[in-house]
Amino acid sequence: MIITIDGKACECEKGEFLLQVAKRNGIDIPTLCHHDGLPGQAACRVCLVEVKDGSRNQVTASCVFPVDHEIEVSTNSRKVKEERGMVLALLRMRAPGSEVIANMCEAYGAPKIGRLKPVVDGDKCILCGLCKRACASLGNGAIETLMRGTQKYVGTPYDQPSGDCIGCGSCAEVCPTGAIEMKDEKGVRTIWGSEFRLVYCRECGKLIGTEEYMKAAGNTDDLCDECKGRQTAGMVKDFLKQR
Amino acid sequence: MYRKIVIRPESCIGCRSCALVCSYGHFKAISPKLASVKVYSMDDFTEMPLMCMRCDDPECVKVCPTGALARNEKTGAVEIDHDKCIHCGKCVAACKLGNIHKAFGLTIKCDLCGGFPKCAAVCPAGAIDFIEVKEEEE
């Protein structure tokens, strides 16, 4: 199947998402809540595109729009620019502390909204839920979006330190706005209100993770990648000597 | 007939050209930290170049939560998709041979350069070689 994105003919399979097709063909669509390793969730609405399907026109989130027949897509039409600008302006009100969003507002021409005030001053979270998905994909499920409506926030159940968290830091890694704080201090990692003892390589002293994390990954001998490699090199050498 | 990487540590002169060309080929940067081939200096002054050994049943693919690590059937190498990776580091801990590592926020692993390994092409001493194996010799 061939669809047209910004005048460029792009080949794609039925059921593929628009964002995927655009990315493969080198067409830039800005995103916040999207990560290639996790399913699209259309939470941030920054990836808006205009889809022309015969006489119908619609502006939709490209990360969850499956292609099922030949359509014409525009990523930079006047309508898209306007709506994306408004989405970014509202996100800036939601997360005034985030540099990423401030830069995007500037790059994509977001209008200034005078009559609204930031929800929480200095907040960085846009409540996209990517962190919760990454945690679930790892099989931990330690964090969730809590409360509903304007009081919604991301946290551990009942704001108590979660027993399921292993302190891997994947949530902080995937967060598009850098809202999750993770601190490594004096052999202790603090994240989501829990404290984890850090594990260092027993040969060279390099940081390799937390105790719970090493247990989950099935690593029992507390060696970093380089020391494991050195061990392997020794094994290979002995093997070659025997031959 | 297929091709495979052969290491001859007795020929290695420890120049680290392989590590430099590896990092340049993948990331356009000259940095041994970003290289997926590592040269270890052993206690008896021998040098040992090592890279991913392409296990039959790779542990790293099994633990990857997002499917960022997958085997390329064409080359036989397990490749990493940097866009899909969420940097949980499970593969680093799971690889018992220590051939996956993290540097500068990236997870780095040998992908056989899409079937034409640059380390083997550049090695001046023939310590890393990419040879053809006839099926009778298997």
Image (cartoon, coloured by chain):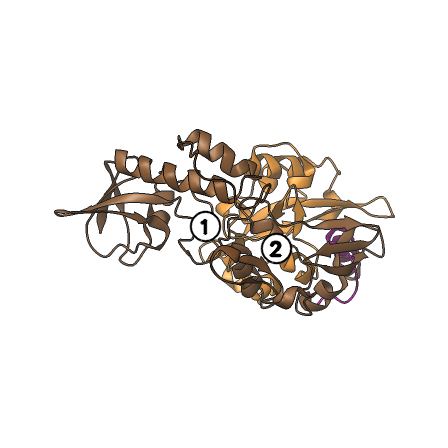
For mark 1, does the 10 Å Cα neighbourhood hold few (<14), some (14 to 19), or many (20 or more) residues? many
Placement of B125 over or under A159, stated as above or below: above
The chain under label 2 reads A
The chain under label 1 reads A
Front residue of A97/B67: it is A97
Front residue of A67/A197: it is A197
**How far across and down, in percent of the image, does residue A9 sit?**
24, 40
**How far across and down, in percent of the image, does residue A110 sit?**
40, 33
Q: State the extent of the magenta-drawn residues as a range.
A: A218-231
**How far across and down, in percent of the image, does residue A141 sit?**
58, 67
The amino acid on which the numbered mark 2 sits, given as a three-letter code, is: Ser
User: As drawn, is A72 to the left or to the right of B126?
Assistant: left
Q: Chain B shown in which color?
A: orange
User: As drawn, is A142 to the left or to the right of A94?
Assistant: right
Residue extending furthest toward the right: B44
Q: Which mark is residue A34?
A: 1
Front residue of A224/A45: it is A45
For mark 2, does the 10 Å Cα neighbourhood hold few (<14), some (14 to 19), or many (20 or more) residues? some
User: As drawn, is A10 to the left or to the right of B80?
Assistant: left
Q: Residue at x 20, y 48 (%)?
A: A71
Residue extending furthest toward the left: A55
**Residue B77 can be seen in this image:** no
Q: Chain A shown in which color?
A: brown
Circle 2 is placed at which residue position? A170
Q: Give the structural element (helix, strand or loop) at label 1.
A: loop
Q: Residue at x 50, y 60 (%)?
A: B67
Q: Residue at x 79, y 64 (%)?
A: A221
The amino acid on which the numbered mark 1 sits, given as a three-letter code, is: His
